[in-house]
C-alpha cells in the first residue's frame, strides 16, 4: 500500500500514513504544511469535518494539532478502512475521531443537528467533477442550514485552473494558495443576511 506522506506536527508528528490506492491524491507534505501553517491559530479545540477524506491525512493532521473532534466522510469502503487504520497508527482512534462511509453531499444534506456546527471544513473532491465541489460549498454556505459555526472556515482543494466561485451563500473566499497543479481556496462564513451583499 502506498504512503500518503506523514503527520507534520502535534501528538502524531512523523508518523507515515497509508493511502487507499492510485486513484487517491493525498495531501502532500508541502501543501499540508502550508495549509496548517495558515490554520494553526484556529485548530485548537476545533470541531472539524474532513469531506471526501481519502486517506484522512487532513483530518488526522488537525487532530494531531489539538482539534477537539473530526468527522471523516468518505464513500469508498477501502478508503474508509485506510482512514481507520491511519487513525489507529497515530493513536487518534478514540471517540473524537468518527469515520463515516457515505456520499459527502447526501451526508451534508442529512447531517444530524447534534454534530453541527463545524469550525473547520476541509473539502477534497475529485478534481474532474467541479460540480461536486460547488455542491458541497452550496450546502455549507446555505443560510438555511446551520452547518458552519460563526466565522467558520472552509478550505477547498482543487485543480488550479478550476477555481470555485468567490461567493456561495454565506461563504466568501479570502485567500487562494497554489502549489503546482493544486490550489487551496479559503472561505470564511459571513454573518446571517450577508449572502445578498
Image: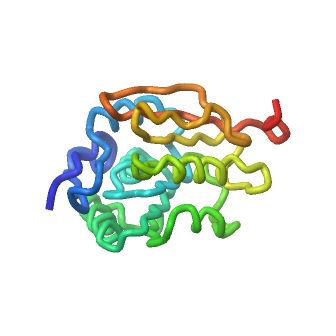
Q: In this orientation, which residue lies closer to the viewer: 93 or 131?
A: 131
> Residue drawn 33% across and 51% down?
57
Q: Is residue 144 left or right of residue 126?
A: right
> Residue drawn 61% across and 52% down?
118
How many numbered marks appear? 0
Q: Is residue 126 left or right of residue 105?
A: left
Q: Quadrant of the C terminus?
A: top right
Q: Position of residue 12 (x, y in %)?
A: 28, 50
How has the structure been colored for display? rainbow
Q: Is residue 158 left or right of residue 174?
A: left
Q: Position of residue 131 (x, y in %)?
A: 54, 50
Q: Position of residue 175 (x, y in %)?
A: 53, 25
Outermost residue toward the left? 1
Q: Is residue 27 visible?
A: yes
Q: Check the image and report above or below for 119 versus 39.
A: below
Quarter of the rendering containing residue 17:
bottom left
Q: Position of residue 181 (x, y in %)?
A: 32, 32
Quarter of the rendering containing residue 112:
bottom right
Q: Quadrant of the N terminus?
A: bottom left
Q: Is residue 39 visible?
A: no
Quarter of the rendering containing residue 35:
top left
Q: Check the image and report above or below for 69 versus 102.
A: above
> Residue drawn 35% across and 69% down?
80
> Residue drawn 27% across and 61% down?
86
Q: Check the image and report above or below for 71 versus 33.
A: below
Outermost residue toward the right? 193
Amino acid at each position: 500500500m502506498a504512503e500518503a506522506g506523514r503527520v507534520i506536527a502535534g501528538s502524531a508528528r512523523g508518523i507515515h500514513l497509508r493511502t487507499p490506492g492510485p486513484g487517491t491524491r493525498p495531501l502532500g507534505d508541502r501543501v499540508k504544511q502550508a495549509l496548517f501553517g495558515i490554520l494553526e491559530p484556529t485548530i485548537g479545540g476545533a470541531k472539524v469535518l474532513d469531506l471526501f477524506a481519502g486517506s484522512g491525512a487532513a483530518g488526522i493532521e488537525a487532530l494531531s494539532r489539538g482539534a477537539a473532534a473530526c468527522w471523516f466522510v468518505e464513500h469508498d469502503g477501502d478508503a474508509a478502512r485506510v482512514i481507520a487504520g491511519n487513525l489507529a497508527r497515530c493513536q487518534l482512534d478514540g471517540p473524537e475521531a468518527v469515520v463515516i462511509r457515505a456520499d459527502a453531499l447526501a451526508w451534508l444534506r442529512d447531517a444530524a443537528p447534534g454534530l453541527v456546527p463545524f469550525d473547520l471544513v476541509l473539502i477534497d473532491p475529485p478534481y474532474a467533477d467541479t460540480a461536486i465541489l460547488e455542491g458541497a460549498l452550496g450546502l455549507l454556505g446555505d443560510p438555511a442550514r446551520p452547518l458552519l459555526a460563526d466565522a467558520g472556515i472552509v478550505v477547498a482543494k482543487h485543480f488550479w485552473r478550476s477555481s470555485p466561485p468567490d461567493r456561495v451563500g454565506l461563504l466568501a473566499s479570502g485567500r487562494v494558495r497554489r502549489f503546482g497543479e493544486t490550489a487551496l481556496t479559503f472561505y470564511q462564513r459571513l454573518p446571517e443576511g450577508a449572502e445578498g451583499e
